Image: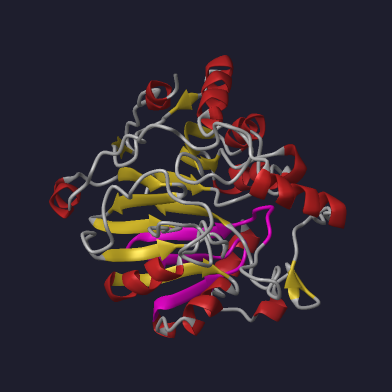
């Protein structure tokens, strides 16, 4: 824990000082396997012209609409899934957002790219003031340009991995609102302790910025409450290290969706998601990164079915709330198998 304490004192390092930064780019602990040209071309062709059936629901996703009055009346330690990896937390009377994506498409353009299966349960305009936005990396399904600009006027702070904050500042966000952390660094905001923890992924929003910014998972500590937010990641031994250093966790918000064996290094299969939860010493598992966008080749409901079956087999407490449904972080509930009602 000495290293954690040391790193926590240095909250604004230069990127060059980061152990993850070499030769102008950030790196995983283990090198990411290269994708061959023909393999990449075939994958692109499949996505554009040969997608299997069932990757998009043919019935509306159930959404429990939220109002500002409902949020303000909710007790502390409430959680709401707003879609994909966007989660709203109410802690110490203030509100926190993870990877806020509110746009219609997870794409650099508004006329093409993966479209939402459902509207957000609440609009940005209706949200109460946000104490902080917690960002995991800069991919379009996690960093929404329009949402960031709209949130800027009602958000106290954007907390991001190294380099992601530079992107926000380039978009016009006040540098005083931006805090950037390296892996294992912590900051305290309004009584919460936020720690950027390792992940196994990559970054980039175009052809020239590959891995120019860091990716991270996050640990959110509110007194005796501990929440883990995975962002995007493949399975790696970092989960055990995080669990040993900062666990156990009351709830783990772990990516479970948009996976495929062709990119297993950067996105976990459901079996790996469950193992990551065990490595982290989690109590409840809430699968995220699903149910909102078509980003892979599996059926849209498959992540829910697979993780539910695995959790039952291993005796893991699983929470699958509808979008907009409240989860009490002090006593989570299992939710319902709502996706089954949409599948014939």
Please state which of residues 36 and 156 is positioned toward the viewer in this rendering.
Answer: 36
Please state which of residues 45 and 214 is positioned toward the viewer in this rendering.
Answer: 45
Q: Up-down: is 315 above or below 83?
A: above
Q: Up-down: is 143 above or below 223?
A: below
Magenta-colored stretch includes residue 26: no
User: Residue at (61%, 56%) from the top-left corner?
Assistant: 1
- Segment colored magenta: 177-202
Please state which of residues 340 and 266 is positioned toward the viewer in this rendering.
Answer: 340
User: Residue at (47%, 67%) from the top-left corner?
Assistant: 187
User: Residue at (54%, 22%) from the top-left corner?
Assistant: 311
Residue 24 location, x and y as percent? 76, 78
Q: In which quarter of the image is the C terminus?
A: top left
Residue 91 location, x and y as percent? 30, 52
On the picture, is 46 further left or further right than 70? right
Furthest residue toward front: 49
On the picture, is 331 further left or further right than 9? left
Residue 336 location, x and y as percent? 36, 23
Furthest residue toward top: 313
Q: Is residue 36 visible?
A: no
**Quadrant position of residue 79:** top left
User: Residue at (37%, 26%) from the top-left corner?
Assistant: 338
């Amino acid at each position: 824990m000495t290293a954690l304490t040391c790193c926590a004192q240095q909250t604004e390092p230069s990127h060059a000082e980061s152990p993850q930064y070499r030769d102008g780019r950030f790196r995983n602990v283990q090198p990411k396997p290269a994708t061959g040209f023909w393999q990449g071309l075939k994958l692109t062709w499949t996505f554009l012209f040969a997608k299997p059936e069932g990757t998009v629901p043919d019935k509306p996703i159930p959404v429990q609409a939220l109002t500002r009055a409902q949020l303000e009346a909710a007790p502390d330690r409430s959680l709401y899934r707003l879609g994909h990896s966007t989660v709203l937390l109410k802690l110490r009377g203030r509100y926190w957002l993870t990877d806020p994506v509110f746009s219609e498409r997870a794409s650099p353009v508004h006329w093409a790219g993966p479209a939402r299966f459902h509207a957000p349960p609440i609009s940005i305009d209706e949200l109460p003031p946000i104490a902080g936005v917690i960002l995991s990396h800069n991919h379009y399904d996690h960093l929404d340009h329009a949402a960031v600009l709209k949130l800027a006027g009602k958000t106290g702070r954007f907390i991001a991995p190294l380099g992601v904050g530079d992107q926000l500042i380039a978009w016009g966000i006040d540098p005083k609102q931006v805090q950037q952390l390296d892996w294992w660094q912590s900051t305290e905001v309004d009584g919460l302790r936020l720690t950027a923890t390792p992940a196994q992924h990559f970054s980039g929003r175009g052809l020239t910025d590959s891995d120019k910014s860091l990716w991270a998972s996050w640990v959110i500590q509110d007194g005796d409450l501990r929440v883990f937010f995975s962002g995007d990641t493949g399975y790696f031994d970092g989960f055990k290290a995080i669990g040993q250093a900062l666990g156990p966790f009351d709830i783990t918000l772990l990516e479970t969706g948009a996976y495929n064996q062709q990119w297993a290094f950067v996105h976990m299969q459901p079996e790996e998601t469950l193992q990551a939860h065990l490595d982290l010493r989690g109590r409840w598992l809430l699968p995220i990164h699903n149910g909102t966008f078509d980003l892979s080749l599996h059926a849209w409901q498959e992540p829910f079915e697979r993780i539910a079956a695995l959790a039952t087999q291993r005796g893991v407490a699983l929470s699958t709330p509808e979008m907009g449904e409240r989860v009490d972080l002090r006593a989570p509930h299992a939710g319902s198998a709502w996706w089954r009602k949409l599948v014939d």
